[in-house]
Image: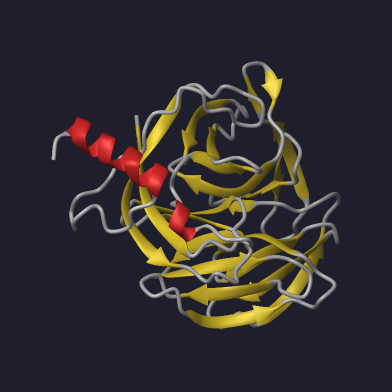
Amino acid sequence: MSSSSRKASFLLCILLGCPGLFSPGEVPLALSQENVRCNGFTPRPLFSYQVIDAYPHDRGAFTQGLVFKDGVLIEGTGRHGRSSVRKVELATGNVLKMRRLPRRYFGEGLTVFGDTVIQLTWKSGVGFVYNKEDLRPLGKFYYKGQGWGLTHDGLRLIMSDGTSSLRFLDPFTFEELGKVEVRYAGAPLINLNELEYVRGRVYANVWGTECIVIIDPGTGLVEGWVSLQGLLGPEDTGPEVDVLNGIAYDATDDRLFVTGKFWPKLFEIKVRD
């Protein structure tokens, strides 16, 4: 299939919904969207994506944090009374282990640091630490403001709180070490949500949009945007399906995974110029 034919077929798939259109090995490319707006900005440079594979995802998971480690996904979910931390099998979406949070907590982003899983909560100012293998609780810590996304660069935790700031925390004491303001086109970029550290850059979901922003954590400057418009087809939408949220990176095999809140699928994608 030619590139132009593939793009035309993919456009029909987006407009009409046609699962199974592409045969195995044929991977559709996302179309360039000239009128994409992300959080009030016209994003440039704007990268597209290629879908490599799709996997089942728990429709009951309000995804807040996502990590790929040691061959499995570790996922944090939110909402009062429904928040959890869980280990998930990539190929099937089956939950292998799960630890529920007390009903008063609204789970947010998480990361794996060493032998621990570290998870934030939304407005409680409390984070939880678990054993990575069995999700056994190991302790808790406290922070000011809201908790949104969490990742790390190997030395420091990197946290978002709904503002334009990325905050750096000591991964052992959880003391705040500093922060950087994320800016694009000279203006602060707010609503930074779930985070993932990818080859020296922070990838962040921009809440309420279908965009991921690529940030230099040293300067806070936005180096690019990824529009995931059209990733979830009409056949997969429903009354509870919510926004794009969840980025996981497999550093061993250089794979990038994304999903959303109550999405029925998790996708492996490749970012393209």
Percent of width and height locating residue 65: 60, 59
Residue 169, placed above or below residue 34? below
Residue 155, placed above or below residue 201? below
Q: Residue at x 71, y 74 (%)?
A: 82
In which quadrant of the rendered view does residue 184 lie?
top right
In which quadrant of the rendered view does residue 128 lie?
bottom right
In the picture, measured across the screen, residue 135 lies left or right of residue 142, that is left
Percent of width and height locating residue 86: 57, 75
Q: Residue at x 44, y 73 (%)?
A: 93
Which residue is more in the foreground, 92 or 102?
A: 92
In what quadrant of the picture does the N terminus appear? top left
Percent of width and height locating residue 217: 59, 35
Colour convention of the picture: secondary structure
Residue situated furthest top in the rendering: 186
Residue situated furthest left in the rendering: 1
In what quadrant of the picture does the C terminus appear? top left
Residue 140, placed above or below residue 94? above
Q: Residue at x 75, y 74 (%)?
A: 139
Percent of width and height locating residue 157: 64, 51
Which residue is more in the foreground, 271 or 221?
A: 271
In the picture, measured across the screen, residue 190 lies left or right of residue 42, that is right
Q: Residue at x 57, y 60 (%)?
A: 238
In which quadrant of the rendered view does residue 42 lie?
top right
